[in-house]
Amino acid sequence: MGSPNHLCYNLAKDMPKRLNLSQEIEKQLPGELVNFMWMAGEIAHTRGEKLYLVGGVVRDLMLGQANLDLDLVVEGNAIELAQQLKKNIKGKITTHPRFNTAKLLWDNWSVDLTTARTETYEKPGALPQITPGSLDEDLGRRDFTINAMALGLNPGLYGKPIDPHGGRDDLKNKLIRVLHENSFIDDATRIWRGLRYEQRLDFHLEKKTLGFFKRDVDMLKTISADRTRYEIECILKEPYPEKVFIRAAELGVLPHLHPNLRGDDWLAEKFEQARKLSDPAPPEAGLYLALLAYPLAKEETERFISRLRLPKALAQILIDTAALKSKMRLMATPGLSPSGIFRLLEAYSSPAMVANSVATESPTASQNIHQYLTRLKYIEISLTGDDLIKMGVTTGPEIREIMERLQKARLDGEIASRDDEMALVQSWLTKQE
Ligand code: CTP
């Protein structure tokens, strides 16, 4: 499997270590966001505050990659600043007074505004205690050096990189590096995040970071089901999630989701097939998850569901997938009639069928599922219960029985029209007399 162009970050080798990145901002971000940042910098300045663009968007600007998720940090008061900005852009804001953060929304844009802060972790895995702080402190609490950079937005500082942890050098050398040795202990979701960035960007965990990573893998136990699920959801939105799972298997991370999951060539092949089937859209998370969980037995699937506290709809897809898996031998029967296929499949959700058609070793089973999804499930009979009563069928269970027999005949191609249906019912009624 080759990397497509949009994943080739050939960035940083040629990235000039310029003192100002305002040209990158201008080139890579839409005019509306650029104007907004100018304006926000000016307003913060008049308020005597310093405003910065931070985190992933700075990393991606340096990589020459599109990223419209603007995260702004203010040394000051984010909510008050957001309220003032709101008037200028005629937008809306939502606020979180406890964390002194705000989200600005206007037209199709959304920007997060946070008050610079320090974090202390009372115990591993817990959410941190937060107190207002400086930009330096704010950058110092972050996961990786490449995510711990900022660009000034105030007049005079506009586009100026602030890189206290050597993030630009790490971008250049394609390295994922934590800021301190207890980073994964403080927040073990960084274990998943590190793998996600490593595989997305085609980088490597830096040597010492890899040492801390291996030492601290077991800290994943400290992470709640909801936070773990969020990380997995983020991975499933990557262009090639299997790369993350394969690396996770290699580094002993995958068994923390379930010991019997596979992160290997089989998974890569199945995810690739899922993409081909869903093209041009990426596969739904449910389909990817069903394939990830496919190697699990029924009871193991249930454990996996509760490990991630999956929402009902996703859980149902996984349960259906496991139940349908046990019917794949029947589904592979040569010469299975269309009505037989219909009966085996009708109770299950579509992603569970697609997952089984991708994962089964039997081309016949796969074709039968395809036939159901593209044709059989749309076949309906024309006659209604009322029509049958008018024809002389007695009300009660017989109606349902006749309708099922009609549907079977339609599915198997024995009849093809309303007239055929009427003739068939008539012949059954005559036989009964
Ligand atoms: N961050 C962190 N530790 C975490 C989560 C987030 O330090 N466990 C910091 C990083 O600086 C990150 C920023 O918060 O860049 C924003 O988080 P998020 O939106 O998850 O990351 P991005 O890098 O912006 O986005 P993406 O992962 O999609 O590239």
Image (cartoon, rainbow, N blue to C red):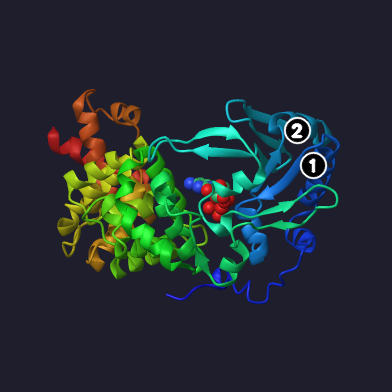
Mark-to-mark CA distance, 1 and 2:
8 Å
Q: Which residue is mark 1?
A: 40
Vertical side of 337 occupied by 220: above or below: above
Which quarter of the image is occupied by the C terminus? top left
Q: Residue at x 41, y 48 (%)?
A: 189
Vertical side of 7 occupied by 370: above or below: above
Q: Is residue 200 visible?
A: yes
| Residue sitting nearer the eye, 399 or 86 | 86
Percent of width and height locating residue 424: 25, 43
User: Sequence-wise, which precedes: disc 1 or disc 2?
Assistant: 1
Determine the residue located farthest toward the top in the rendered image.
Answer: 395
Q: Which residue is mark 2?
A: 81
Which quarter of the image is occupied by the N terminus? bottom left
In the displayed structure image, the side of residue 72 where residue 409 appears, left or right: left
Query: Residue 41, located in which quarter of the rendered image?
Result: top right
Q: Residue at x 77, y 64 (%)?
A: 19
Q: Residue at x 47, y 36 (%)?
A: 128
| Residue sitting nearer the eye, 125 or 6 | 125
Q: Are marks 1 and 2 in contact (CB under 8 Å)?
A: yes
Kind of residue sitting beneath label 1: Ala
Query: Residue 44, located in which quarter of the rendered image?
Result: top right
For the image, the number of numbered tags is 2
| Residue sitting nearer the eye, 332 or 188 | 188
Disc 2 beta carbon < 8 A from ligand 1?
Answer: no
Q: Is residue 291 visible?
A: no
Q: Secondary structure at mark 1?
A: helix
Other-residue count near label 2 (Cα within 10 Å), few / some / many at <14 / 14–19 / ≥20: many
Q: Which mark is residue 416?
A: none
